[in-house]
Image (tube, helix red, strand yellow):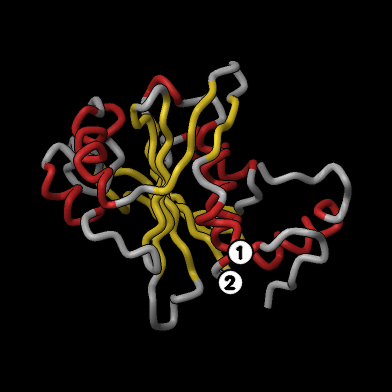
């Protein structure tokens, strides 16, 4: 079991009540993070529809069809899907989601998916989002986080490694992109409890802050 914080931080209340929040990127740009609500569905559909083909290449469904987005994000249930929106000047420029089963033998596993517009890629946004979802996993007592992506998604690999994810497997020609090209699937995981123990000494220092 993940130990309780021994500092003045209630991780169980971290997730919902800490939003919206602002983050400054390495180029000085300020973005806003907040939890998606049902009122955001139309804007999320527009976001996915606006993505160019090179950004849709790795998605699991045809997001230009709004019904596919509606099936995924309509009638939100935060117990099994936790979506964080990234906004710049009021417009959605990214979304990160943690998926988890409510019941069954994989109920303590969370799977993350991150989609960011081209203009905000390689600016540290993915790292910020993965970090946010890590603390959500802590608050929900998840034991492991899984991240899957195609082998050509180099920025996804870098962001995952930065957060301490380790490669579990590469499945050869396991997935097919929207152009019909077969790709290798990379599976990386993060053991939340193990990472927590590594972080514990740092968390107890005066320098630690969660913004």
Element assignment for label 2: loop
Q: How crowded is the residue under tag 2: few (<14 C-alpha within 10 Å), some, or many (20+)?
A: some
Quick check: 177 left or right of 87? left
Q: Residue 146: x and y, percent?
A: 49, 59
- Residue at image position (28%, 27%) is 54
The one nearer the camera, 135 or 166, is 135
Q: How many marks?
A: 2
Rendering quarter of residue 201: bottom right
Q: Residue 56: x and y, percent?
A: 26, 34
Q: Residue 113: x and y, percent?
A: 40, 49
Rendering quarter of residue 150: top left
The one nearer the camera, 173 or 186, is 186
Query: Mark 2 to mark 1: distance in Å?
Result: 5 Å
Q: Residue furthest top?
A: 27
- Residue at image position (50%, 28%) is 31
Q: Which mark is residue 141?
A: 2
Q: Which mark is residue 62?
A: none
The one nearer the camera, 87 or 186, is 87
Element assignment for label 1: helix
Q: How crowded is the residue under tag 1: few (<14 C-alpha within 10 Å), some, or many (20+)?
A: many
Image quadrant holding the C terminus, namely: top right
Q: Residue 145: x and y, percent?
A: 53, 61
- Residue at image position (80%, 54%) is 203
Q: Are marks 2 and 1 in contact (CB under 8 Å)?
A: yes
The residue that label 1 is drawn on is 138
The one nearer the camera, 20 or 170, is 20
- Residue at image position (68%, 78%) is 1
């Amino acid at each position: 079991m993940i130990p309780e914080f021994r500092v003045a931080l209630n991780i169980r209340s971290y997730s919902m009540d800490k939003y919206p929040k602002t983050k400054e990127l390495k180029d000085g740009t300020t973005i806003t993070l907040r939890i998606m609500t049902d009122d955001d569905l139309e804007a999320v559909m527009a976001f996915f529809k606006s993505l160019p083909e090179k950004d849709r290449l790795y998605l699991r469904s045809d997001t230009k069809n709004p019904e596919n987005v509606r099936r995924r994000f309509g009638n939100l249930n935060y117990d099994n899907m936790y979506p964080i929106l990234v906004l710049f000047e009021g417009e959605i420029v990214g979304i990160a989601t943690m998926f988890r089963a409510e019941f069954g033998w994989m109920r303590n596993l969370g799977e993350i998916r991150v989609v960011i517009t081209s203009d905000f890629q390689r600016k540290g946004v993915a790292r910020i989002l993965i970090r946010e979802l890590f603390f959500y996993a802590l608050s929900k007592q998840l034991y492991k986080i899984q991240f899957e992506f195609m082998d050509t998604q180099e920025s996804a690999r870098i962001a995952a490694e930065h957060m301490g994810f380790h490669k579990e497997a590469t499945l050869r020609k396991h997935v097919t992109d929207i152009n019909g090209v077969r790709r290798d699937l990379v599976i990386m995981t993060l053991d939340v409890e193990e990472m927590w123990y590594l972080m514990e000494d740092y968390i107890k220092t005066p320098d630690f802050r969660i913004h």
